[in-house]
Amino acid sequence: MKAFRFLHAADLHLDTPFSGMSGVPDRLRRLLRESTFAAFDRLIRLAIEEAVDFIVISGDIYDASDSSLRAQLRLREGWDKLGEHGIPVYLIRGNHDPLSGRRLRLALPGHVYEFGPRAESVTAVRRHDGEPVAVLTGSSYPTPAVHDNLALQYRREPGSALYHIGLLHGNVDGQEGHDAYAPCSLRDLEASGYDYWALGHIHKRQILCESPWVVYPGNIQGRSLKETGPKGCYLVEVAENGEAELSFHRLDQVLWQESRLAINGLTTEEAWKASVEEQLDELREAEPGRITVVRLTFTGRGPLHGVLQSGSEAAELLQELRRKESLKLETASLDTDTGAENLRLGEGIVWLAGFKLETGMELDRESLLAEDSFLGELFRLGEQTTAEPEVVEELVRAALAPLSDNRQLRRLLQELDSKAKQNLLRRAEELAAALLNEDTPLLREGRGAS
């Protein structure tokens, strides 16, 4: 076997529309909209710089089945650049961009191979000498919803000494939070005899197995706070003995993050504001040249709990911090004003998506649990309830039954796990304690600032 190199990417979701964020200046909104294209441009540049032999893309190149002409033209620009350097692309379609999609389809250049609806195999060669190095097998989604186990169609070519790569867009072992499209098990993939499974569909980067390699590279650009952390692709280097080494390469222009800040020990609003700014500066220093979109969750207990619950201080600070970042965005150099790729951010931009509160008032729970009072009885009852998950489920269901007609509330409740429901009961305890304590002003339920 000859040594070779390739890139494995998936879930490009080009031209994803961004919505649901309030208070975003126009320039940032444009950059968010362009971020998937910026990540794609970086993928193309990485392939050229690393002089890879080919690229595999495991589905969901477009975000919608009726992909825009703009997205197709931008994609074609990238293909043309690869063609100038003799780098072929092998791709499959996923649930977001199935073969049945309604689109004005631009013809693919000769060096881009799109697999059909049934598993088929092609041979990939090294660029510089044309030596065959790998057998690639793939199958595209004919329609948006595929519930068959496509992995069962993949079988190693008998007697072939070439490296075998399977391109598959699907859910392995029923991972939660994702549609069960093209479901299969890790055992199915292991039984195929393939050397490397180039997976797509799951946006969280993960390596499920190393022998054979079963790899989700994740999407190349996060698109919301549900897709946090660095995003990119894998460079796979296969040695003459068939052993592979993987290295992750970042492609994202916008980093989505969740961050936490404890209020324990903070006794003044000035100290709290300084802590917030310090945390944002740390995020900025960690990601120079990038836009970081972060939601900051306040945790812990302390005297600032009541201030944060009121919401006004948090809202004012949020507005001021956003104003400062907006000024930085306006003064940043942007060559074309159409793509984040050309933005010169310098130290980076940190945009606050909002604040979330998970704080509590200062309570001596042990003393309250031992106290012979109504409040003590309330906390003892709470302890007993949270110790039994089935009781928590029933209590939450009964308490919210009058609101069951609210579709959005039903959806939110379905997303809550048992720990989240226990936290709701704890917050209810603390709110009750505040209302029963004559020295504590009436607190209204706060949702944080956004």
Image: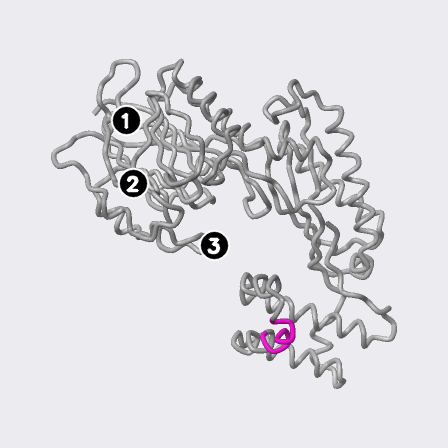
Cβ–Cβ under 8 Å for marks 3 and 2: no
Label 3 SS: loop
In which quadrant is the N terminus drawn?
Answer: top left
Q: Which of marks 1 and 2 is nearer the N terminus?
A: 2
Tag 3 residue: 177
Amino acid bearing label 3 = Gly
* 251 sits left or right of 210 in the view: right
- The image shows residue 51 at horizontal and vertical percentages of 38, 18
Label 1 SS: loop
- The image shows residue 289 at horizontal and vertical percentages of 63, 27
Query: Is 19 within the magenta?
Result: no
Amino acid bearing label 2 = Pro
Residue at screen point 26% across, 22% down? 125
Q: Nearer the viewer, mark 1 or mark 3?
A: 3
Tag 2 residue: 117
Cβ–Cβ under 8 Å for marks 1 and 2: no
Query: Is 402 within the magenta?
Result: yes
Q: Residues within 10 Å of mark 2 (few under 14, many from 20)?
A: some
Q: Nearer the viewer, mark 3 or mark 2?
A: 2
Amino acid bearing label 1 = Ala
Q: Earlier in the sequence, mark 3 or mark 2?
A: 2
Label 2 SS: loop
Magenta region: which residues?
397-404
Please give the label number shown on residue 446: none
Where, by quadrant of the figure, is residue 417 drawn? bottom right
Where, by quadrant of the figure, is residue 82 drawn? top left
- The image shows residue 274 at horizontal and vertical percentages of 79, 43
Q: Which is nearer the eye, 279 or 351?
A: 351
Marks 3 and 2, how far apart at CA: 25 Å
Tag 1 residue: 239
- The image shows residue 128 at horizontal and vertical percentages of 29, 14
